[in-house]
Image (spheres, helix red, strand yellow):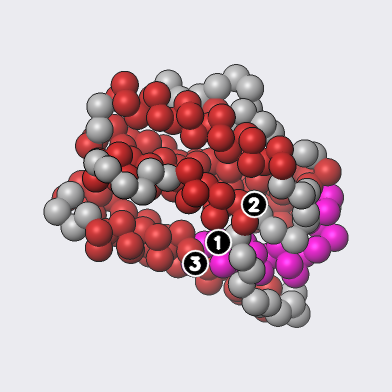
Amino acid sequence: MEYTNTKSILGLHLPTDPRWADLAGISLEEILTDHAYCEQKAATSCISLIQRYSDREKLVNELAPIVTEEWGHFRLVLYELQKRGLRLGKQRKDEYVNKLIDFQRKGGNIEDRFLDQLLTMALIEARSCERFKRLSEGLNDEYLQNFYRRFMESEAGHYTLFIELAETYVSKQIVRSRWTEWLQYEAEIIGKLELRGDRIH
């Protein structure tokens, strides 16, 4: 894909610190709780896009099954918590996602806002995919390694879908230019956020 950069998986400019997976393994209840809410928010975000842009047939048709898939992921993570005798904790403030939203263009052209919303979703999926790859390789629990490998593959597909949807409605040149800006901004966020093992992002 044209958007892939050799600096990191999926074009991300700053890879996750390898120590993060070790911290996540220590905070298993917290990381699974955060993962569950990430899946829930992914489903509701897709629903919001469908509601907001219901006139865009391809977007509606492509995102409708993603809603079902993301909610299914929420249920899988919830089951994993319960199976291990762990509790679903409270949803936390997602500093990473909030900082991404800050970068979205809020006024002006509706197409610019639409593009930024899609690219935000693509970036969240890309970073989630990268984090799940870390977990699939870094956790000591073999079952969870396989568990997160499946999630990694799913997130990679979602990342690709959001890029493709952007290119459906906006010129590739504009998408490519704005995506470069997003990648640079996201790397700055990752570089400044505290390394914590109790959250996916």
State left or right for residue 99 relative to residue 174: right
Q: Residues within 10 Å of mark 3 (few under 14, many from 20)?
A: some
Badge 1 amino acid: Cys
Residue 94 picture location, percent across and down: 60, 60
Q: Secondary structure at mark 1?
A: helix
Q: Which residue is mark 1?
A: 38
Are the two marked residues, 1 and 2, in contact with CB atoms closer than 8 angstroms?
yes
- Helix, strand or loop status at disc 2: loop
Residue type at mark 2 is His
Is residue 96 located in the magenta-colored stretch of the structure?
no
Where residue 110 sits: x, y (%)?
A: 24, 45
- Residue 12, by quadrant, is top right
Residue under pointer 3? 40
**Which stretch is magenta?**
21-40
Q: Which residue is mark 2?
A: 201
Position of 33 compared to 177: left or right?
right
In the rendered structure, the answer to whether residue 171 lies left or right of residue 10 reads left
Mark closer to the chain start, 2 or 3: 3
- Asked whether disc 1 touches disc 3, contact meaning CB atoms under 8 Å apart, the reply is yes
For the stretch drawn in magenta, the main secondary structure is helix
Q: CA distance from mark 1 to mark 2?
A: 9 Å
